[in-house]
Amino acid sequence: VTPSRRSDEGVPTDQARRDERSTIGVWSGLRGILSVAVASAALAGLAWLLAVGVALMFPSVP
Amino acid sequence: MLIRPGPRDLRIIGFYLGKVATGLSLMMLVPAGLAIVLREWNSATALAAGAGICIAFGQLSEWRLATSEPLRAAHGTVIVALAWLVGSVLAAVPLYLSGHVADLLDAWFEAMSGLTTSGLSVVQDLDHMSYSMSFYRHLTHFVGGQGVVIVVLAIMTAGGGAGTLYVAEGREERIVPNIIRTARFIFAIAGAYLIVGTAAILAALERDGLGGWRGFGHAINLFFAAFDTGGFAPTSQSIAYYHSVGLESVIMVLMVAGTVSFALHYQLWLGRTGQLLRDLEVRSLTLTVVAATVLAMLGLASTGAYTDASGLYRKGFFTILSAHSGTGFAVNSGALIVTDWGALAPAAIVGAMALGGMAGSTAGGIKAMRIGLTVKGVQHDLRRVLHPSSSLVVTTYHSGRRRILRDATARAATTVLLLYILTYLAGAAVALAYGSYEFTEALFESVSAAANVGLSVGIVSPDMPVGLQLTYIVQMWLGRLEFVAAFALIGYLIALVRGRT
């Protein structure tokens, strides 16, 4: 069972309290930024493949 | 029957609005300092005058209205709704005094557009605006993007009412239990991206020949506009001015970062990268971005506007990402979208603008979470119909953790979705009533304003009709508040007149 962040009454749970105590530092920040950059790159890569595919579908249009 | 608010209620509201005004004075004092360093005396005077008015307002409320009475949810909601109105009027003062807008209404429009991270602009002679005033204009994105009230909470620790105000500003649940720590964490994220993002933009600009202090000025302004999904740019040609693939790539990453909710940022900072694959909002957003990109590219290719992969990617994908994230950066003249891009590509852009980014981010629009919940709700109803009546149908979704879809949650998402659609159509109807605009143009501009995007096909300009300008101001305000606080304010005003004592 995944511990919930907040009970139905809105009281913070142990998981949320642990999160709050978690140290957010330079390295965790860089890790977060890198995750977003990688996800963006994956999306951009997919968009590039789509662009290539669409360009191949319309080769004769001037 | 509503209960009529008493003098004590109004005192509380006035006191907290004063705190917001004091917070906004900082937003003007920083660029005022820059103006003094750069010897831009006109801008320094305009910014100092604006800051002075804010400080006077704040001190007056502190002197006459100071109270230690607890803040109720109704107060919080009304304060937030008024804070965006009063704040935008105060933020308009330096812009008006700068001489770059025709009148006070234009200044208010520009300030509302900046604070709500919309990015629609009526500034005149933008390319000759002073550095400090340009910095101030972009700083409004940063302050508004983090949330005007959040700024005050983080800087001034506004006492016991912090949680009430935080929720009232339309934020999702707190990232960590302590509200002040949540506000400060939001600023920590923004601060980290400010350093990394500005450096990356500067590197891209340096590579293309725009370096030094001038490049740094452009970089920091572009960062504010990209990460806060605003859309203002230092030049009138937006991103097209730079002709830089490198810059466009960095901007795309920052637009994605801006449209990611702060709660998801937090999970990623804790190393929980698996959230990117499981989260309902991420899935919903990815699907709609990809679908809109395909449609836009097909539209561009079929009309012959762009047929090579590079053109389709740089114009099609960038514009869709700019629209979907609510940023509003343009890589071509806005008028071209309706004159040269056919019907499919503009429709895809309007759709992307309408849908918007993630809930709890700086993006506007309907939000990926509501789209996901609405689809899940339809799916749930279908399953309930198809299963035997005795069976218990449970639908779940992932948002931070696994959650059970409740009827009330799905209903609330659908209600706000419908309100957005009505607002989009109402704005388009007002524009059409002037008889000078086509339906596509009217809908495009209306969606851009209400979803706080900022892409324009040319209706928004210094000489636009006053009634339409006021309509877009209201749309930007409603879109940013996601209706609840605005409706609460209307209810509060009705209670003031007709409420029971």
Image (cartoon, rainbow, N blue to C red):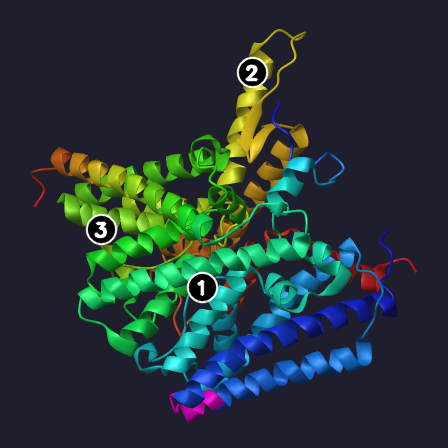
Label total for image: 3
Q: Chain of mark 1?
A: B
Q: Nearer the viewer, residue B178 or B147?
A: B178
Q: Would you say residue B498 is visible in this rendering?
A: yes
Q: Is residue B500 above or below residue B60?
A: above
The picture places residue B361, in percent across and down from the top left corner, at: 51, 51
Residue under the image location 45 percent in, 33 percent down: B274
Residue type (three-letter) at the residue carrying disc 2: Arg
Q: Which residue carries the number 1 mark?
A: B434
Disc marking residue B493: none
Q: Nearer the viewer, mark 3 or mark 1?
A: 3
Quadrant (top left/top right/bottom left/bottom right) for the C terminus of chain B? bottom right
Please give left or right for residue B394 compared with residue B121 in the image.
right
Q: Nearer the viewer, mark 3 or mark 2?
A: 3
Q: Nearer the viewer, residue B438 or B141?
A: B141
What's drawn in magenta, residue-wise? B38-44
Residue type (three-letter) at the residue carrying disc 1: Tyr
Q: Is residue A27 magenta?
A: no
Q: Nearer the viewer, mark 2 or mark 1?
A: 2
Q: Secondary structure at mark 2?
A: helix
Choose the circle earlier in sequence order: 3 or 2: 3
Q: Secondary structure at mark 1?
A: loop
* Residue at the extreme right: B501
Q: Which residue carries the number 3 mark?
A: B314
Choose the circle earlier in sequence order: 2 or 1: 2
Q: What whole-number distance in Å separates the C-alpha atoms at marks 3 and 2?
A: 41 Å
Q: What whole-number distance in Å separates the C-alpha atoms at marks 2 and 1?
A: 47 Å
Q: Chain of mark 2?
A: B
The picture places residue B235, in percent across and down from the top left corner, at: 30, 72
Disc marking residue B383: 2
